[in-house]
Amino acid sequence: MGGNGPAAENAALIDALIEAVGLDHTTTSTDAREVASQDVYRSGELPLAVVSPGSTSEVQAVLRACMRHNTATFVRGGGMSYTDAYLPDRKQSIILDTSRLTAVREINARDLYATVEAGCTWAVLDEVLSEYGLRSVFWGPMSGRLATVGGAMAQGAVTFGSGRHGPSVNAALGLEVVQADGSLVITGTGGQPEHSAFLREYGPDLTGLFCADAGALGVKTAVTLRLEPRPGAGEGLSFAFDEFTELVGAIEAVSRFGLVTEVFGAETALMRLAAGRAALKQDAGKLLAIMRGASGPVQALRTGLRVALGGRRFLNTAKYLVHFLAEGADAGELRMILRRIRRAVGGRGVEVANTMAEYARAAPFPDPMIVGHSGRRLLPLHAIVPFSRAVGLHEEYLQYLEDMREECEEKQVDAYVVYSVSGKAAFLWEVVIYWDDEWLAFHRRYLPDEVQGVVSEGQANPGGRELVERMRVDLIELMYRHGAAHLQIGRAYPYARDRDPGALELLRTVKRQVDPKGLINPGALGI
């Protein structure tokens, strides 16, 4: 190539990327670059290219090319982020898309582990493992139809399995990670010749070092996951609460004994809005899915009848709802667990129709929530706090929201609280902000087929957008004051702020070792 300027340098980079992954898997089209550089919330800088390697060796070649040409690499999995997790912060960058890294390399049913490439979605993996009567101990977030295994290891996630096992990273036994210079790191017992990847806890936990790193320490190309047998029986219970204090107390009492695999819930007002747009045909489809998910024909009839009779009446009572999903080896064990859950909740809440809990069990991976009800834009912000601090966090938030109410009404902004758990002692509290606004290309690209024509794009609302950004900053500060931790740290949450200096310098030393030029997801974690 002739010339020595930036254009010639970038042309040489593109040539090297094409050589690494092929012309069909390297794109410089404006549309593709625009979508890849956006997330649920906003846009990053437009990268030079989007590259989709199909193997670990191709990832290595891509990173070597980027290092030679001083180009930053931002790694994109399913794209379900809202924390600038993979958004380019400079034009001299590429997006490394993992959507071709989808192989399930090994399933060891006896030793209970599976090795899967980073771009495999949780929904696909769960379907494959179901043929063996197995699943990962963490088996996906609700966005698992798009969310990837590698993304959940880099960013962290909760939902299915989190009631007992905590966040997604606890399922990892070992990782395959490509460093900035293209060299390979294999963690866990699988990192020695003729050793299987069955154990994480052998020597210093290098697997943990690369987990939840927001992609800052390298590109994960494969993950070995801890497996467990699929349960013989399962059922969901739902409860309504008038007071947030009572809700927290009930969830704490249930969680501390590991009685449930999942906990999730929301303000009833939000659930009414979400349910209001669903057609009767959709309800019938959900009922059929619930009945198919029952453990036998008699159970299917009982469950279907209970859900049909309950309908949506549970949405007309109380202020908060919570759903507990429980499992047992057989129906007898499940009945015992359900009795213990009811005793733990006690008189704090009222049991209501378990429609939503049963649907979550029957159809765990719905179409991801790209926009809200009626097509409104949305931004979730979460905090993980000990149960002892959950009520104080919520009460300060309610006062903040009351102070903002007039401006929110003026600029068409609403906020609702949802909640979950991570293990036995961590309460996940999340605010979802909704506002009227135009969509990004991201939203148009990923809008689920079932809501096409049901929701519509709003008009540009710069005032609402500015208010949401202000609220985002304020709420993250509020969470920090209450000692919150976070998943999906990206560049949004204050991981590095006021952190122990020794620990922070150690992390920065690791970053310099694995990425001396600072080219792998620069800015992530605030380091």
Image (tube, rainbow, N blue to C red):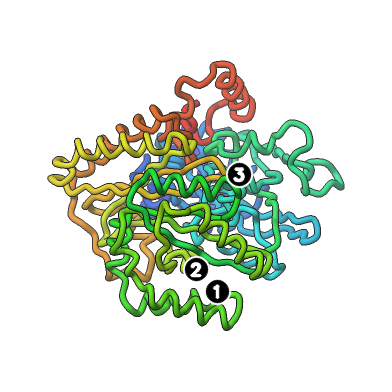
- Tell me the residue that label 2 is attached to: 363
User: Decide: marks 2, 1 in contact (CB < 8 A)?
Assistant: yes
- The spot of residue 40 in percent (x, y) is 37, 50
In the rendered image, the vertical position of residue 352 relative to residue 59, given as above or below: below
Circle nearer the N terminus (2, 1) = 1
Alpha carbon separation for disc pair 2 and 1: 8 Å
Residue extending furthest front? 347
- Tell me the residue that label 3 is attached to: 169
Mark 3 secondary-structure assignment: helix
Circle nearer the N terminus (1, 3) = 3
What residue is shown at x 44% (from left), y 76% (from top)? 306
Which numbered disc, 1 or 3, marks the residue closer to the eye? 1
Alpha carbon separation for disc pair 2 and 3: 23 Å
Q: Is residue 286 visible?
A: no
Q: Residues within 10 Å of mark 2 (few under 14, many from 20)?
A: some
Q: Type of residue at label 3? A: Val
Q: Residue 423 versus residue 139: which sits nearer the camera?
A: 423
User: Decide: marks 1, 3 in contact (CB < 8 A)?
Assistant: no
Q: Is residue 506 left or right of residue 237?
A: right
Q: Type of residue at label 1? A: Gly
Q: Type of residue at label 2? A: Ala
Mark 2 secondary-structure assignment: loop
Circle nearer the N terminus (2, 3) = 3
Mark 1 secondary-structure assignment: loop
